[in-house]
Amino acid sequence: MAVEPIAGDSRFFARTGPHRLAALAAAAGATLAEDAPAAAEFESVAPLQRAGPRSVSFLDNRRYAPLLETTRAGAVIIHPELASRVPAGCAPILTKEPYAAWARVAALFHPPPPLRPGRHPSAVIDPAAGIDPTAEIGPLVVVGAGAEIGPRCRIGPGAVIGDGVVIGPDSRIGALVSISHALIGARVFLYPGARIGQDGFGFAVTETGFLTVPQLGRVIIEDDVEIGANTTIDRGSAQDTVIGAGSRLDNLVQIGHNVRVGRNCILVAQAGISGSTELGDFVVAGGQAGLTGHLRIGRKARIGAQAGVMSDVAEGADVVGSPAQPIREFFRQVAALRKLARPAARGRSEGPNDAAGGTNDQD
């Protein structure tokens, strides 16, 4: 089986081009050197080690600077401070934000597939649902009564949109997503298998067992949010669960009922937020971090991977470990434990029995 040698396999990704170097710089919001071949044409994007003369590459992490010296790329997006290291024959595209510029150039070569407005014949749509005529409704989609789907939305195969759900314009709902009890803003992306709006984990303990508490809140997802595959967001119990504008949730994240996630937060894979915890704006939680309920996490706080957060975190604080604690204190304790674990200096050499933990009774 033939494998394409560059990014953007044409079996899966649309491709435009060729594009002139000047157009690439304009798309990137970057500049070119005065002697750059502005009319030169490029056909693709590729990493430094795989790029060819008609490919555009980038360097953002200085760790990979040695790859720059041997690249065959015809152009490279790079910070001005590293421009002198670009090899001959490779045109530098200069910007202080190389990764963001790369994203724009890659999107120029590989735009998202165009919408195909209309409803697939296999979709099941309640007559009381309101669907904008510019929306794309895929195969086997179910849309409940009173649901509203805005302009230019794409609803993927097998998705279930519950009664009364509202989805704002330009949103993308992936295959097999289920949504209930939710109001969703504009330009929201829900990746395949996400579950939004199901009952929260709420029950009363009685002498005869557990009594389920009705979950009467909603899920509010604000504009420009992306939610990864198989992530679950429970609706509120008596108030709303809220995901703030611009936030990014990775795959397999769990959000409990009544949680409020601020604007532009990042929650990495397998992070779990227990009920009624509030995250300020720009909070970052690493992979597998776990937060107990009813906490307050301050603005711009950062929570390390696998941290167990059991108390409030101050604004701007960095915490790691389980139980989570300030990062400097954590590593100070690690250093102290390592010091205690070192073998004590001995005044004489260990004999064979000493090394094995035995005694020397002959003496």
Image (tube, helix red, strand yellow):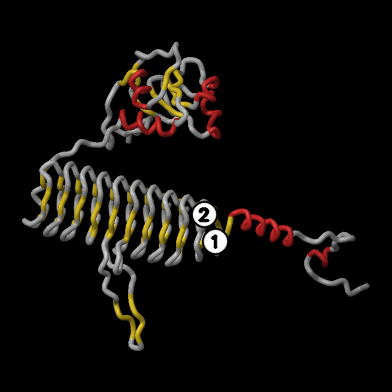
- Check the image and name the residue furthest to the right: 363
- Check the image and name the residue furthest to the bottom: 207
Q: Position of residue 240 (x, y in %)?
A: 30, 62
Could you tell me which quadrant the N terminus lies in?
A: top left
Which of these two is toward me, 74 or 260? Answer: 260
The amino acid beneath tag 1 is Ala
Q: Position of residue 125 (x, y in %)?
A: 10, 55
Q: Find numbered disc 1 in the image and state the secondary structure of the residue it sits on.
A: loop
Q: Position of residue 321 (x, y in %)?
A: 56, 59
Circle 2 sits on which residue? 304
Name the mark on residue 159. Answer: none
The amino acid beneath tag 2 is Gly
Left or right, 40 with respect to 11, comes to right
Which residue: 44% across, 12% down?
Answer: 34
Which of these two is toward me, 272 or 259? Answer: 259
Left or right, 265 with respect to 186, comes to right
CA separation in Å, label 1 and label 2 = 8 Å
Q: Is residue 239 above or below residue 96?
A: below
Q: Is residue 139 above or below residue 277?
A: above
Circle 1 sits on which residue? 324
Which residue: 26% across, 36% down?
Answer: 112
Q: Find numbered disc 2 in the image and state the secondary structure of the residue it sits on.
A: loop
Q: Decide: marks 1, 2 in contact (CB < 8 A)?
A: yes
Which of these two is toward me, 326 or 171? Answer: 326
Q: Position of residue 121 (x, y in %)?
A: 8, 49
Picture quadrant of residue 280: bottom left
Number of on-image labels: 2
Picture quadrant of residue 232: bottom left
Which residue: 37% across, 59% down?
Answer: 260
